[in-house]
Image (tube, rainbow, N blue to C red):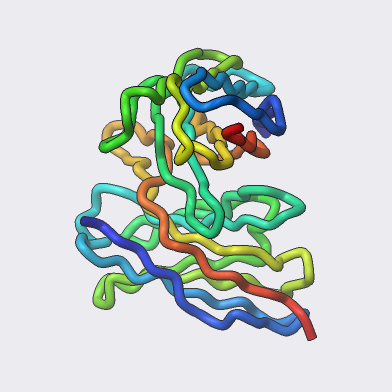
Amino acid sequence: EIVMTQSPATLSVSPGQRATLSCRATQSVSSNLAWYQQKPGQAPRLLIFDASSRATGIPARFSGSGSGTEFTLTISSLQSEDSAVYYCQQYKNWPPMYSFGQGTKLEIK
Amino acid sequence: QLQLQESGPGLVRPSETLSLTCTVSGGFISSGTYYWGWIRQSPGKGLEWIGIIYYSGSTYYNPSLKNRVTISVDTSKNQFSLRLSSVTAADTAVYYCARNLAYCGANCYSSWFDPWGQGTLVTVSS
């Protein structure tokens, strides 16, 4: 089983600044990693797939990087609406055995 | 625009079976390109993948739930469903349905989930 660990658990950043969120896998998932944003009372929304490709309609201030076991979601020029919990998900294997990180809560000061 | 909507009882008694349905609009399950899945979210365990199904009925389940889970599809209604048996309080969660962009050509490839339904809270309590 591939376990995904996100850090930090909570991040507080000022508007206009940059936020860097991390996701680590217990074994290599190559580039088979997605990032989601979840706001209170809403379903997760896909931000990034294949580690660095932005989903349709996602602003360019969201970017993903990494491969293997270490991944980063960077949100540049933070806006108030970016306040949310962010999750990573790996999808390396077939048959599928999907797993998610426990989330990073991003607060905008 | 593809949309998914979960429906079903919000309260289930312990030891009984949880049953939910996901209705897909704006696209057809039978188009055959992708899989369709269930994910749940509880405060104690975060996001947990339950399983996925293809329009043909082929399924893959999370091994930790495999003995209690059945996912089925009804292409005539453009719906797929989840049944989870012998529920306990630990199964209390928000249940989401979502499209899974896994696909099979010469080989099969796992993928991400997009879009998701709004989710439905299921509480297990007597």
x, y percentage for residue A54?
33, 28
For image coordinates 45% across by 55% down, the residue present is B37
For image coordinates 66% across by 28% down, the residue present is A11
B122 and A15: which is toward the camera: A15
Residue A97 visible somewhere in the drawing = no
x, y percentage for residue B84?
62, 70
So how many labels did they put on this image?
0
Quadrant occupied by the N terminus of chain A: top right
x, y percentage for residue B121?
59, 70
Specify the quadrant of the image occupied by residue A64. Answer: top left
Position of residue B34 in the picture relative to residue B52 (left or right): left
Q: In this picture, is B99 found above or below B123? A: above
x, y percentage for residue B124?
72, 76
Position of residue A26 in the picture relative to residue A86 (left or right): right
Residue B19 visible somewhere in the drawing = yes
A33 and A82: which is toward the camera: A82
Q: In this picture, is A65 found above or below B69? A: above
Specify the quadrant of the image occupied by residue A8. Answer: top right
Specify the quadrant of the image occupied by residue A6. Answer: top right
A109 and B89: which is toward the camera: A109
For image coordinates 61% across by 32% down, the residue present is A109
For image coordinates 49% across by 17% down, the residue present is A30
Position of residue A34 in the picture relative to residue B121 (left or right): left
